[in-house]
Amino acid sequence: MRKIGIIGLGHVGRLLAHDLVIANKTDQLVLIDRDDALAVGLKTDLENAQTALNTRTKIILQDYAALRNVDILITTFGNSSLLKKEQMAELIQNGEAVREIAPLVKQSGFDGIVLNISDPNEAITAYLQQQLALPTEQVIGIGTTIDTARMRQSVAKTAELSSQNVSGFVYGQHNGDKVFAWSTVTVNGQKLDESINGHHLDQNQLRINADLDNWYTFKGLGYSASAIVAWTLKIISAILGDGELSVSVAIYQPQYSGYVSFPTLLNRNGQGHPLLFKLYSVEAAAVKTAVGAIQQQLTVLQQGGKIND
């Protein structure tokens, strides 16, 4: 039996719950939010939708005890409107949310996989792992998965090809010290310093185009949800299935003694083997810088302080 839990029913949590139910991707779905009325309203709406589709997902509300035998727990709490003030504005609020939910999750006896969507993703993922006291391979964050997808799309558009023809990863820190690892990027097996489909690909412009996708989404909607949910569903399928998925997610990397977005294989156990590409020296140094920034944020959370204290 497939059982998934979601804590936090904002834009991402609601859309994810909708897609899981509509596509019949889980047998039981546990929904938890601070707002009881919101949770009840979402449950009612989803159950009404099931009558049209004849799906049979059992929806359980506001019950931490029901997390005991959940396969994957997805944390999606946060307030994206805070990002209009500063890039890491959600750090303190989401740190408080972790301290609130962690004792309740632990009390339930939960021992599954945690997939964190909340930002700043790498620091909150690391803090969740510490507060839940779960093995690091069981606690991952979505990290730079979307940044990687945007980078590949930018390359594909410029080369006038499908993004399926592009491989490569963005490392580091989502919404922070992102590291566009051009050394890992290939288009149909060709490196970017070669002529691709008759085009010369300028790395600086590729990065600008990728970042513009994020800017347009946030400016127009005020949040990002569809891409996050689509990739979250792919990650869920990899964990619940028998295959492996290579993505750049927030994982504990022993090489850096901390969490950072790093390409890895995901499977039924959560984090599988990291993909160890030989980075350019400037890229490797930039990843270390990102790790340092993430550690500073984690220290703030551990001390329960404020960013500027």
Image: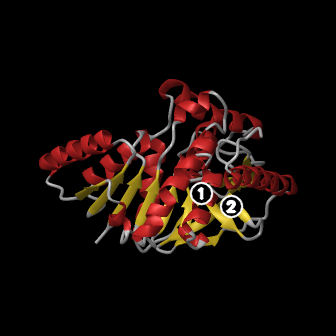
Measuring from the top left, give residue 110's x and y in whole percent.
43, 70
Left or right, 181 with respect to 133, comes to right
Q: Residue at x 45, y 71 (%)?
A: 112
Instruction: Classify 296 as above or below 131.
Output: above
Q: Tag 2, which secondary structure?
A: strand
Q: Residue at x 77, y 69 (%)?
A: 255
Measuring from the top left, give residue 105's x and y in whole percent.
45, 63
Left or right, 301 with respect to 28, comes to right
Of the pair 19 and 68, the residue shown nearer to us: 68
Of the pair 139 and 231, the residue shown nearer to us: 139
Q: Residue at x 26, y 57 (%)?
A: 60
Q: Quadrant of the C terminus?
A: top right
Q: Residues within 10 Å of mark 1 (few under 14, many from 20)?
A: many
Q: Residue at x 36, y 52 (%)?
A: 32
Q: Amino acid at mark 2?
A: Tyr
Instruction: Please identify the residue farthest to the top as the structure is shown.
Output: 220
Left or right, 207 with respect to 157, comes to right
Of the pair 38 and 150, the residue shown nearer to us: 38
Q: Taking the image as drawn, is residue 124 in sight?
A: yes
Q: Which residue is mark 1?
A: 125
